[in-house]
Image (tube, helix red, strand yellow):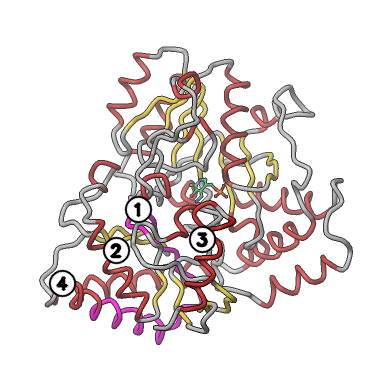
Amino acid sequence: MQISKSKALFEKAQNYIPGGVNSPVRAFRAVGGNPIFIEKADGAHIYDADGNSYLELINSWGPMILGHNHPMIKEAVIKAMENGTSFGAPTAREVEIAELITKMVPSVEKVRMVNSGTEATMSAIRVARGFTGRDKFIKMEGHYHGHGDSFLIAAGSGAITMGNPDSPGVTKGTAKDTLLAPYNDLEAIEQLISANKGEIAALILEPVPGNMGLVTPKPGYLEGLRKICDREGIVLIFDEVMTGFRLAKGGAQELFEVTPDMTTLGKIIGGGMPVGAYGGKKEIMEFVSPAGPVYQAGTLSGNPIAMAAGLTMLQYLDTHDEVYAQLNTIGDKLVSGIQASLNKLDLNYTINHLGSMYSLFFTDKEVFDFASAKHADTGLFGKYFQAMLHRGIYLAPSQFESLFLSTALTDDYISQILNANETSLKEILSL
Ligand code: PMP
């Protein structure tokens, strides 16, 4: 595979951009080698600057649920552009998308648009603090909620990948209000609560975490959190930036039938444009300015182009239930094929899978929280990543990320991925 243009671009980029990239995981530090610079994407494929094509299993980290460059989204964006790119004033489309989100996501009665997942979670915590009059909140080890100061403590995603889950620049004063618990452990939550009685504003988690690789909730876990939060007057926040509109129309909360008090969203609601949102119960959201005293604002929030892309995407998902059946079938075919290869090669690696998200962990132990995810052999993952890339399959460049499938993956493409998977495993393990 020839990547001379990507190499030249990365070399030049390092002169002007920290580490040569605008978001750390993109630098391929965890997997070695030169990052590929993308020129375009269409359907199930992305194309790099040297003209190589790859089948996509990241899909812009989630939002491209229908594949890249979908004609319907493109048309909506172009049409919106004809009327101007930003007004900093309310539009009809914002009302329409807010109404649709409240219809689709069980916990959301009112919603505020922002520009990223990071903004959504930072704002949700501020509102929960304003609503309860309490300062502390609980976060799970290995979960990632963007790069807001109070979340960069035992954070997942790029923070684990870069080996700095606790970032310099976060003050001790900020860090002391973030309480940490292992995922899938209700007893640990009870202990934190009894040690901080009446002081905890919120409990935030990815209901199905994808930022330490994909991990699924144990039966009863989410229900248990709901009961504890009700009992203690703690605002339960599901961060569904990855899972919202992907695991089901109404996200993980619909799938597991557990309704949080607040929800943070991102990615898919922008149809690939930079959008996030937070919403929840009316009485909580009424605390947000200008309805209430908790300040939160954004010059470009509800941007007309982003709203056009997002609204088109959500309207489509709302009226096409078959998308979820299709995504689940694609996920099942791919994961059962990978499992069959593992069995054939006598390998016991762990695959965690739910719907159109999965992770292959290079460990034979069960992965159910951050500590168990760290058993994975990241060196071996790096070799697997490179072997797959050379066979035209684009995976997330870290063991600690979920993969995201799209409806653009046909049976032929799935076969290509499965062939590449088996050959890559044989190659890296010299089988
Ligand atoms: N929450 C979750 C669960 C995420 O996965 C991410 C990003 N991957 C974020 C928040 C932050 O979103 P953004 O990168 O748009 O700021």
Disc 3 crowd, CA 10 A, few/some/many (<14, 14-19, 20+)? many
Of the residues under marks 2 and 3, which one precedes in the sequence?
Answer: 3
Q: Amino acid at mark 3?
A: Gly
CA gap, disc 4 and disc 1: 21 Å
Q: Residue at x 59, y 56 (%)?
A: 16
Name which quarter of the figure residue 228 lies in.
Answer: top left
Magenta span covers which residues?
Answer: 398-423
Label 4 secondary element: helix
* Residue beneath disc 2: 382
Give the class, few, some or many, for how many residues have Cα within 10 Å of label 2's Cα (few <14, many ≥20). Answer: many
What residue does disc 4 label?
429
Q: Secondary structure at mark 2?
A: helix
Q: Position of residue 75 (x, y in %)?
A: 75, 74
Which circle, 3 or 4, is nearer the viewer? 4
- Return the mark for residue 62: 3
Q: Looking at the image, is mark 4 or mark 1 nearer the viewer?
A: 4
Quarter of the figure that contains the N terminus: bottom left
User: Cβ–Cβ below 8 Å for labels 2 and 1?
Assistant: no
Judge whether residue 403 is colored magenta.
yes
Instruction: Find out if the beta carbon at label 1 lies less than 8 Å from the nearest ligand 1 atom.
Output: no
Q: Are marks 4 and 1 in contact (CB under 8 Å)?
A: no
375, above or below 387, in the image: above
Label total for image: 4
Task: Report the quarter where the C terminus lies.
Answer: bottom left
- Give the residue pinned by disc 1: 400
Percent coordinates x, y for residue 214 in the rendering = 35, 54
Kind of residue at badge 2: Gly
Q: Is mark 3 within 8 Å of ligand 1?
A: yes
